[in-house]
Image (cartoon, rainbow, N blue to C red):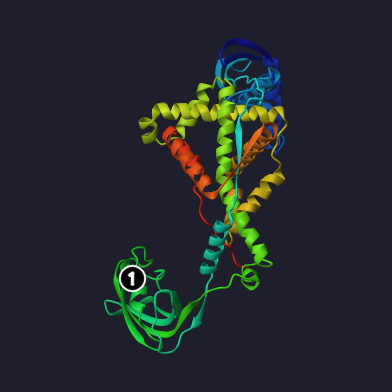
Amino acid sequence: MKVQVQSKKGLKTTLSIIVDKVEIKKKLDDRLLELQNEIDLKGFRKGKVPPLVIKNQFGKAIYGDVIDKILKESTTKAIQDKKLKVAGQPKIDLKTFGEGKDLNFELQLDLLPEIKLQSFEKYKVSDYQVKVSKDVLDERLENISNEYKSFEDKNNDAKSELGDQVIFNYEAKVDNKEFEGGKGKDVSIELGKDLFLQGFDKQLIGVKKKEKKKVISTLPKNHPKKELADKKAIFECEILNIKSPKKNKLNDEFAKKLGAKDLLDLTEKVKTQIADQYNMALNSITKKEILDQLEKSHKVDVPQNLIDNELKLIPKNSELKNKDKNIESAKKRISLGLILNEYGEANKIKVTEDEIKNEIQKQVKSMPGQEKFVFEYYQKNPSATQHLQSSLYEEKIIKFIKSKINLTKKELTIKEAEKLITSFNEENKAKASPDDKKKEAKPIKSKKISKK
């Protein structure tokens, strides 16, 4: 095989490749011998069909398969021998081919740019940490106490009030007819939460134990039985019991109910949880500071074919509306990806199979009851595993860069952190393309402490 550089312009390179006809004939003959053991023709014993007979009957198809294989093998070898880093799929332009002839073709390649890695010396990056004050911690513990409140029986003649728990049986009818799912026993609702049916709770305020109460409510629009959706139903309720909320005492006993060793352990768990929620968002800001400085300190000529491929992922309506923004955003994403990958390769950063498995296990633990779904999702979607691997690879490179730069430690109160996160998101919304808006630092939401 002969390989020559036909032309080179910017990131585009064309190679001229010639595969000798003798080499092609050898591969054809080898393939015919392989097919002898596979082809079953009438009049011949299996494995005894002469190669010439096989060639006469299937010659064109066999030649096509052999040439296709040679094209793939010679393309890979030429790229490896020339030590080229290719961006996207090569284009093949056949010049001469045919049985008894040399195979002559051109390989048109888009190459990845050479990136000269720069020093981190002048980087200015903030490392944010949240300080959880006592009042914030006390408020969160109080909320947890209220969320997991217990109830105690009220006197028989006491009326139900907002916040009470009412236990009842019911029989419901629509258009004076019973329906499937229209009966319930020992149903328990907390008045005011409106979790049963909209407006149902209010009608049970003021009832007594052993009382019978008629409640009229509308069934939901997404009711499984379409004929019942959005229909008015009459519920004949028999009140079994009424309980009033009992305030929990924040003590070791309560902490143990939530799976902690004692109150001190619960307090530390809650404190860590609050800090982690904010630090996750703040890490996004630190990462953005690093990426911005990486982009400024490196000049990268982005291959056009990579930009075109990136733009294909954007919905058509968005592509037309925000064409310039989308192009710039695509260039930036590709440029940063190439820079990060260069740092990864230069420092031999890799993602192991165990790291991927551990990350999947983390996702499994965060989705109780859906373990099977998570495992099957990654088993059936290799692209999802590849995306996970890419995310882990990027995070490892960012972590490496953080270890090499001078980070300015900044401790923030919760209010300061919220203000910074909001400001960061608003600023980036204004600059970003619609696709980039998905990557903003997430607003903070309180997580529940799960019971064991």
Q: Residue at x 59, y 64 (%)?
A: 450
Vertical position of residue 314 compared to residue 297: above or below: below
Residue toward you, 163 or 298: 163
Is residue 383 visible in the rendered structure shown here?
A: no
The residue at which mark 1 appears reads as: 199
At label 1, the amino acid type is Gly
Measured as percent of width and height from the top left, residue 34 is found at 71, 32
Q: Residue furthest left?
A: 175
With 398 as the anchor, is 422 left or right in this view? left
Q: Residue at x 60, y 20 (%)?
A: 113
Choose top left, top right, bottom left or bottom right for residue 145: bottom right
The quadrant of the picture occupied by the N terminus is top right
Q: Is disc 1 surrounded by few (<14), some (14 to 19) or many (20+) residues within 10 Å?
A: some
Choose top left, top right, bottom left or bottom right for residue 179: bottom left
Q: Residue at x 42, y 29 (%)?
A: 325
Vertical position of residue 134 compared to residue 395: above or below: below
Is residue 7 visible in the rendered structure shown here?
A: yes
Measured as percent of width and height from the top left, residue 334 is found at 54, 28
Measured as percent of width and height from the top left, residue 158 is found at 41, 86
Q: Residue at x 55, y 45 (%)?
A: 281
Residue toward you, 58 or 328: 328
SS class, disc 1? loop
Vertical position of residue 174 compared to residue 369: above or below: below
